[in-house]
Amino acid sequence: MATTTFLSNATVLIGAVDVSDQCRSVTLTVGYDSLETTAMGSNGRTYTKGLESVEVTLEMFNSYGAGEIEATLFDVVGDGNTTLVISPSGSSESATNPEYTITNAMMSSFTPLISSVGDLSVVNVTFTGGTFARDITP
């Protein structure tokens, strides 16, 4: 039985801004809508792929100032043309470190202030839509 240990150190870019050093977790889900193609007389349902489906969820430590998390996210909230570049481990793509580029993603809402006494300020955001590409070429 083959086993693999992977210690995550993902890189995350929102537009041209590298937010990796403030990102606690990233979840990328890619796929396609399922379109039913079942015809009369079929013994089971059949499907074909439809439009691409993309969702990126980021959990980040909030920070304020030029080029920081709050400013970066505030600039893209409501835009449907954000580009995200995500890689599991570093910025050099390969077969063992694919790079995913999501174009025309939408972050529809943003909570710029989350604060509790004694806690780090953490912000969760979700980008949806757009298209994705996977690159393994160095």
Image: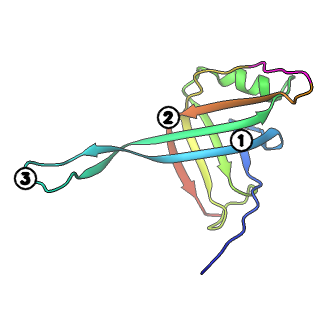
Q: Which residue is mark 1?
A: 13
Residue 68: x %, y % from top left: 83, 29
Res 44 label? none
Residue 64: x %, y % from top left: 86, 23
In the rendered image, the quadrant that contains the C terminus is bottom right
Q: Which residue is mark 2?
A: 129
| Image quadrant in which you'd find residue 79 | top right
- Mark nearer the viewer, 3 or 2: 3
At 62% from the left and 67% from the top, the residue drawn is 95
Secondary structure of the residue carrying tag 3 is loop
Q: CA distance from mark 1 to mark 2?
A: 17 Å
Is most of the magenta stretch helix, strand or loop?
loop
Residue 66: x %, y % from top left: 85, 24
At 75% from the left and 19% from the top, the residue drawn is 112
In the rendered image, the quadrant that contains the N terminus is bottom right
Please provide the residue range marked out in magenta. 112-117
Residue 75: x %, y % from top left: 70, 22
At 68% from the left and 35% from the top, the residue drawn is 15
Res 41 label? 3
Secondary structure of the residue carrying tag 2 is loop
Say whether disc 1 or disc 2 marks the residue closer to the N-terminus: 1
| Count of labels in the image | 3
